[in-house]
Amino acid sequence: MKPIFMTYTKKDLINLAVCMILSVLIIPTFIKTEYWYTSILIPWLCLALATIGQQIVMGYTGQLALGAAGFMAAGAFAMFNLILRVPDLGFVGSLIVSGLIAAAFGILFGLPSLKVRGIYLMVATLASQFFIIWMIDKFGWFKNYDSSGIITAQDIVILGKPFTTPLAMYFVCLAVTTILTLLAMNMARGSTGRNWMAVRDMDIAAESMGVSLLRTKVQAFAISAFYCGVAGALFAFCYLKSLEPVAFDIKLSFKILFMCILGGLGTINGAFIGAAFILLFPVLLNAIGNNVFHGAIDATIISSIEQVIFGLLMIIFMIYEPLGMAKLWENLKQSMKSKLSSSGIKSVKSPVFKK
Amino acid sequence: MANELLFFMEVLVGGLLAGTMYSLVALGFVLIFKASATFNFSQGAMVFFSVLAFCGFMQDFNIPFVLAFILAALLMVVVGLCTERLVLRPLMNASEDTVLMATIGLGYVLEGLAQAAWGVEVRRLDLGIGDFPVPWIADNLKLFISALDITAGLVAAIMIIGLFLLFKYTKIGLGLRAVADDAGAASSIGIPLKHIMLLVWSAAGVVALVAGCMWGARAGVQFALVDLALKALPVLIIGGFSSIPGAIIGGLIIGAVEKILEVYIGPFFGGAIEGWAPYVLAIFFLLYRPEGLFGEKIIRRV
């Protein structure tokens, strides 16, 4: 397809326009209940952003990392301290700086990736998860010497205007997510992303082609942590409205890993699909529990069943479609197209990649 | 001075013995890795699953101790069988990372199943061995060492010697090593791959059960066991993924270093550094000796 605006094709622009109309016009017009914003749309955007971060390091660069929640915590608490101590920075400035602080942690804990891979790297990144949470927990300064353990997040004020209603917060999250998603797509398509993918597919070959492993891997970790940091700050300020290290424990890291893998490794839209699935599925399951069985099933059983289903899906996807839901969506679109066109040309079944 | 030295000894011995508990978890991991080059991330979940089932059999159905243990062990064999059939065989030709992710999923399934079947509350597990200092040692050597720690150490030693002998001197062990070396070649000369895999997963399940009993007797049978079991990963990195002695040495190192750091350096930072110290230690090992103390050198073909 020919690019018509800068390097974007017509399809890209249509997709962008559809997403924007849907999220800016249609959702605010039709969804009036606060519940949707506070419990579904806002966490969805935040977690999708964190999942994009995980995608960059795992899906694009092929480094098994398991510490997204740690970087999110770094971002969230950096944000809290920046607003508290450097009020001149403003919300947007603080958001960027807290992302950069998370990125610094990303560089530090991404360094082992130069030496090791696979599960070895996973263990190294677990260190970041436990260390960051411990650091925040143990040094009172990060929590402004608050003894209660849970700190209320400051109100979001941008250019003197408060953004405190659910709808306003939704727009804040939407704006940040949109900008960062577009950036991520650009990076993934450009030379940066091609370097990442070259390293993922065969690092030694990439190196012999002149791709610097040091630069590429550290860059991927830094950018990934930046995304996670920003996502963490938004998660704390728009969704939780409080800051506590426990909210960013290893379970959240696993959740983001699941979003990333089930959504589809190495895809940006997979991050959104995966996040939506992992967030909505428990809601659906609870609704079934309440409405079909009228609360006859214990809530703990429901959450256990949810865990079993996530695990099963993970196994099933690994066996049948390692590229996740984004790939299923792609296949669905393909088959729809070939049915609609009815020209008799069958769409070529896209090859399933299996090593 | 003598008191300080005694205190240090106590910390050290306590750490070493606690480390054997990590070794027990790591052992199950090594077994599977040795035979199938699979990183079984669900080993921690297996620990939790098996010991919760064991407790459930004993406490909910009033089955006697020994019978409940056998039932739980049989259950782990069934889990091993299902895993081999439903997860590993379809992923036979998949990449390492894919299998690893599938085992993360398997871990989730096991955790969820265990909690759905037996509930989420913390269960007490009484093995009849108290978690208090042994009076004889306390009187004679002036060291306060828990009886449970000593038992765990002994159990770990017995299992490791047993497994070591199994791998080294039996036909099954030879088959296991052959499969680990090259699964394709091993099956082509008639080593039954399916049986070997089933055997290994069952053995790992039983090891998980034993580890779970030790942990459960100390900390209560609860979900936190899964997080504790994660510490087996740094143990493996230090010891090497494919070495049974490595698992125990790694466990000892982690146990001792973690306790010593916690007691002597921890107070300066507000404590609880044992949560991350093993991982940081593992990173340093990774930088200098990625294959671990006893592991085989990692050679990647290009």
Image (cartoon, coloured by chain):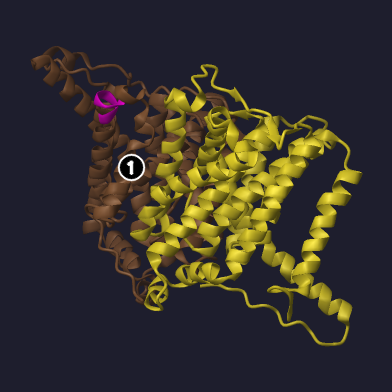
Chain colours: A yellow, B brown
Where residue A319 appears, as percent x and y from the top left, is 58, 64
Quadrant of the rendered structure where residue A322 is?
Answer: bottom right
- Check residue B262 for magenta coloring: yes
Q: Is residue A225 magenta?
A: no
Is residue B65 shown left or right of residue A260? left
Q: Where in the figure is residue B36, as x and y percent of width and height?
A: 39, 61
| Of the pair A205 and B60, the residue shown nearer to us | A205
Q: Which residue sits at x=51%, y=46%?
A: A100
Q: Is residue B251 above or below residue B293?
A: above
- A2 relative to B299, above or below: below
State whether residue B263 is above or below residue A287. Answer: above
Q: Is residue B75 visible?
A: no
Give the quarter of the image for residue A134.
top left
The magenta segment is: B261-266
Q: What residue does disc 1 label?
A: B280
Q: Secondary structure at mark 1?
A: helix
Q: Is residue A266 visible?
A: yes
Q: Residue at x 57, y 41 (%)?
A: A252
